[in-house]
Amino acid sequence: MAEPAPWTCPTCKTGVLTPFCPLCGEEPLKPIDLTLRGIAEKLSHAFTSIDARVLRTARRLLLYPGDLTLAWTEGRRKPYVAPFQLFLVANVIFFFLQSLTGINVFSSSLHSHLHQQDWSELAQALLSNRLEVTRTSIDTYTPIFDRAVVLNAKSLIVLMTVPFSALLPLIFFRKGKPLMLHIVFSLHLYTFLLLVFCLALLAAKACEWSGLGGLDTPVVDNVLSVANLAACALYLYASIGRVYGAKGGVRVLQAVILALAVGVIALGYRFALFLITLYGI
Ligand SMILES: [Zn+2]
């Protein structure tokens, strides 16, 4: 970059010799910046650089498991989207695909909670108690619950990263890593998982169209669940080697334990959504 002429930062009122003000990041105003064309150029630059950053980050996340977590904890942050923002982007894509395919992964309907889950008996007991207390009939209550559970599933998905972040320091207690690294590792893992779920949604829809049956068909559900869990275990195996320096047979064991924990947490999340929705409305 060519050395710019000295200029005075309009915000800090100090003389500046670099292309951007070192104090506030302001850049010298050019005549074009006050025209519509200048604004359009700035806007298109902002959008393309966001796209480029998201794509670069997604590539890192998918092709080099663990690398993004290391980059963040080592301070190489500028080229990538920050962990929480990245998680939100994946969340938006996931929920967009859910409404597009009409398949719900976490937000099971009241009917499903009452008849298809492992906790159905408990759910029935809790519900009849709740209906008595609120003096509502199940017919009025069902549509209210089903609307609320979809909203809750969207806003609370980040909750699943909390127990997982708490598990990591227990599994890797000898490594003495800072808490923030565990949290970022969880966010990156769950971002990856949301993208895997997106693929699973598309696969489930394809099965439905080809006549094999959708997610409510046990074979399709089981095959996709096992595929998700396997993808999760492989990704964990790769990334714990990179981030925690896990090695050998212990590394396999750690990856399996963590993948199973992801499965248990997902089930727990579904049940927690039932409770939160039941007592929240
Ligand atoms: Zn300044």
Image: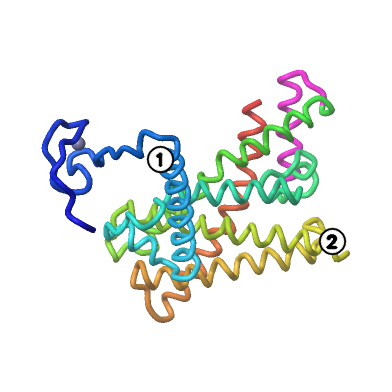
Relative side of 194 to 81, left or right? right
Magenta extent: 119-137
Q: Position of residue 14 (x, y in %)?
A: 12, 34
Q: How crowded is mark 1: few (under 14 residues within 10 Å), some or many (20 or more)?
A: few
Report which residue position mark 1 lands on. Answer: 38
Q: Is mark 2 on a helix, strand or loop?
A: helix
Q: What element carries label 1?
A: helix
Tell me which image quadrant ligand 1 sits in: top left
Residue farthest along the right direction in this orientation: 211
Q: Where on the picture, by quarter, is residue 52?
A: bottom left
Residue at image point 56% right, 38% down: 155
Report which residue position mark 2 lands on. Answer: 209
- For the residue pair 230 and 257, the one nearer the viewer reads as 230
Residue at image point 33% right, 57% down: 72
Magenta span dominant secondary structure: helix
Q: Visible in this render: residue 69? A: yes
Residue farthest along the left direction in this orientation: 15
Residue 39 vertical placement versus 119 (above, below):
above
Q: Residues within 10 Å of mark 2 (few under 14, many from 20)?
A: few
- For the residue pair 30 and 196, the one nearer the viewer reads as 30
Q: Look at the image and say whether residue 163 sits in the magenta stretch.
A: no
